[in-house]
């Protein structure tokens, strides 16, 4: 009898466990979060507010079939969503990046039968039957394509190889709203030796903040006055020195081409804090998507923004005819980081004063020779992976 | 018999041998000599030649115009976005452009504020970036070697004109900054110019006339 009682108590205790595991799936309960979970929760905090969240995660794999991240499936007040997070390790430190987060959308890995493989932006693979397959179209992926995905990774490289596109819109009347931070941002439109777009964008933003916090770039005055003209300086030795410093700092693990979001943040934060200041960034996404009003708020408060793009359209120009605009763009399929300082909103009306279309453009210090201070066209194919306002104090 | 005795005997016999004139010998033998006919052949009946002649002729016909139209190997084309920007002194910029055979307009009348070169990974100068001004305007300019490809959509410029022998495109951008802002693209003497012009007054054509004088 005693033995039966002891056995019964053991079973009851077992069922009363706080944490339950089901195969490789982890279902979170209170006070059992690891560092990755905490990063995920902080990332989603602006959408979470006071609401409760239920989430679980399963592993994601790299091309060597090693765990390199997590797929989160979550529910907030009945609203479901997913997030894809990758992990980078350097020495004894692990960095996390949420590459995608969407509400009311099914994870692209939902249909995965094999191992879910996630090695570059917007590409969802599964490994089964000793091969890699694209989950979107079911096609087998070649070794050379896998190698290209590995090279691209979650890095941002820069611009080039544009394809011209044209779009026309007919209208009865049009209104335009413009805004930019005074004097825009420094127009540095090239890479530095050994660098890429992320280093240029970071340097541009640091030059801006050097106007108010002069120790960021010591012994340097970012603005110059020439007669009636007030403008940013271009690339001087002091500016180049900061860029080279970022090139050294924006690295996690082994040096490689391009820069990830985590590396950008690490480099910027390290440099700013080394100068005795505080580096603060704010995610301008909400509900998993870029929030233009959040962006407007940032730049109207004179805080520049960094955009991380998988691909993008830059505005070549708008040829205004009689009731017709011809909008020329340069499309670039290469991932890019750019610094932003303003916006332009064109609203088109028909003869009955109905809005036909509202087109929004982000004013950027593009960092590209081809565009300089220009406009990012976010009305079509541009893929914004993330947008963060960057504040130094 | 000893060798020396034998040698002596042979020598005595040789001295006694009569050497006849060539003509005497020839007269005796000339009727008996038969010359072999020459082994010359007719190439047009040679099987090897007939087999390959058409191919050889075709190759010659194809190669002949190529031979007379030999062109030097094409120089590499660079995208401007591939180039690296490095700050340099005025002198280094002008020397770099000179050494790269980039023959630019005369900039001596302008006050140059900052100077950079655009170069490749191999440190080959392909252009420059500089800012310059006079009393009534300020300009930021990129200039490039003819082998640098720029992403220019000429259809989006307001105006295309010839200024002296420069082919010029320009468009008015805005006056919101308090200056008349123009974007200018021009090619002149195998050099490409991209200029952001800020004028106190709306005098961009006056600037262009002097710039490409």
Image (tube, rainbow, N blue to C red):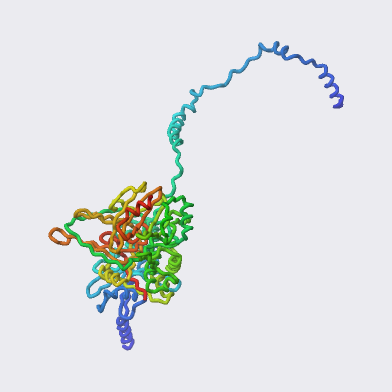
Query: Which quadrant would residue A2 be assigned to in this image?
Result: bottom left
Which one is in front, A101 or B159? B159
Residue at 45%, 56% (x, y): give it: B119
Task: Tell me the quarter of the image containing the N terminus of chain B.
Answer: top right
Total numbered badges shown on the rendered structure:
0
Of residues A136 and B156, the one drawn nearer to the viewer in this rendering: B156
Query: Foreground residue, A105 or A9?
Result: A105
Give the residue at the far bottom of this rendering: A2
Residue B48 lies left or right of residue A176; in this view the side is right
Where in the figure is residue A325, as x and y percent of width and height? 22, 55
> Which sits in the foreground, A101 or B163?
B163
Q: Position of residue A248 (x, y in %)?
A: 45, 67
Residue A253's place in the image compared with B30, above or below, is below
User: Residue drawn at (41%, 59%), measured in percent from left and top?
Assistant: B111
* Residue A369 point in image, percent of width and height: 37, 58
Q: Is residue A164 above or below residue B64?
A: below
Left or right: where does residue A4 sit relative to residue A193? left
Identify whether B84 is placed above or below A37: above
Residue A311 figure quarter: bottom left
Q: Residue furthest left?
A: A352
Residue B209 visible, this angle: yes
Can residue A130 be seen by looking at this rendering? no
Q: Is residue B1 left or right of residue A83?
A: right
């Amino acid at each position: 009898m005693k033995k039966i009682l002891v056995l019964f108590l053991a079973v009851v205790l077992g069922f009363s466990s706080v944490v339950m595991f089901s195969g490789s799936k982890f279902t979170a309960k209170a006070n059992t979060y690891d560092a990755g979970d905490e990063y995920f929760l902080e990332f989603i905090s602006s959408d979470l507010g006071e609401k409760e969240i239920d989430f679980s995660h399963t592993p994601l794999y790299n091309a060597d079939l090693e765990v390199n991240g997590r797929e989160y499936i979550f529910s907030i007040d009945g609203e479901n969503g997913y997030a894809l997070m990758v992990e980078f390790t350097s020495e004894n430190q692990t960095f996390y990046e949420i590459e995608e987060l969407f509400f009311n959308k099914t994870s692209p890995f939902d249909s995965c039968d094999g191992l879910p493989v996630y090695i570059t932006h917007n590409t969802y693979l599964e490994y089964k039957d000793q091969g890699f397959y694209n989950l979107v179209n079911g096609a087998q992926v070649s070794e050379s394509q896998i190698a290209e995905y590995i090279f691209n990774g979650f890095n941002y490289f820069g611009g080039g190889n544009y394809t011209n596109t044209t779009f026309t819109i007919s209208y009865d009347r049009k209104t335009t709203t413009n805004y930019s931070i005074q004097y825009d941002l420094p127009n540095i439109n090239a890479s530095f030796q050994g660098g890429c777009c992320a280093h240029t964008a970071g340097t541009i933003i640091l030059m801006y903040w050097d106007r108010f916090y002069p120790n960021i770039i010591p012994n340097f005055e970012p603005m110059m006055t020439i007669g009636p003209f007030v403008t940013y300086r271009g690339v001087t030795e002091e500016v180049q020195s900061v860029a080279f410093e970022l090139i050294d700092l924006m690295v996690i693990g082994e040096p490689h081409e391009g820069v990830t979001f985590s590396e950008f943040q690490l480099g910027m934060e390290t440099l700013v804090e080394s100068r005795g200041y505080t580096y603060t960034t704010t995610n301008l996404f909400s509900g998993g998507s870029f929030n233009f009003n959040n962006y407007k708020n940032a730049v109207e408060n004179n805080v520049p923004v960094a955009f991380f793009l998988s691909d993008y359209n830059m505005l070549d120009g708008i040829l205004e005819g009689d009731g017709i605009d011809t909008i020329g763009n340069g499309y670039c399929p290469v991932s890019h980081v750019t610094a932003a300082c303003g916006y332009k909103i064109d609203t088109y009306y028909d003869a009955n004063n109905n809005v036909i279309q509202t087109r929004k453009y982000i004013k950027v210090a593009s960092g590209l020779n081809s565009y300089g201070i220009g406009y990012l066209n976010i009305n079509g194919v541009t893929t914004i992976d993330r947008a963060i306002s960057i504040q130094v104090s | 018999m000893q060798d020396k005795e034998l040698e002596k005997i042979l020598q005595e016999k040789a001295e006694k041998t009569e050497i006849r004139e060539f003509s005497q010998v020839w007269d005796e033998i000339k009727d008996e000599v038969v010359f072999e006919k020459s082994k010359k052949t007719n190439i047009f009946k040679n099987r090897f030649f007939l087999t390959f002649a058409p191919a050889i002729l075709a190759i010659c016909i194809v190669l002949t115009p190529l031979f007379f139209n030999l062109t030097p190997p094409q120089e590499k084309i660079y995208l401007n976005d591939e180039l690296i920007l490095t700050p340099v002194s005025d002198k280094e910029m002008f020397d770099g452009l000179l050494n790269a055979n980039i023959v630019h307009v005369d900039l001596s009348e302008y006050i140059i504020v900052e100077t950079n070169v655009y170069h490749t990974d191999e440190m080959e100068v392909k252009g420059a970036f500089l800012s310059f001004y006079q009393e009534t305007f300020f300009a930021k300019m990129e200039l490039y070697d003819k082998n640098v490809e720029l992403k220019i959509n000429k259809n989006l410029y307001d105006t295309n004109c010839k200024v002296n022998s420069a082919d010029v495109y320009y468009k008015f951008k805005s006056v919101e900054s308090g200056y008349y802002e123009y974007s200018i693209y021009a090619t002149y003497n195998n050099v490409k110019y991209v200029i952001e012009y800020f004028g106190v007054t709306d005098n961009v054509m006056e600037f262009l006339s002097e710039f490409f004088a």
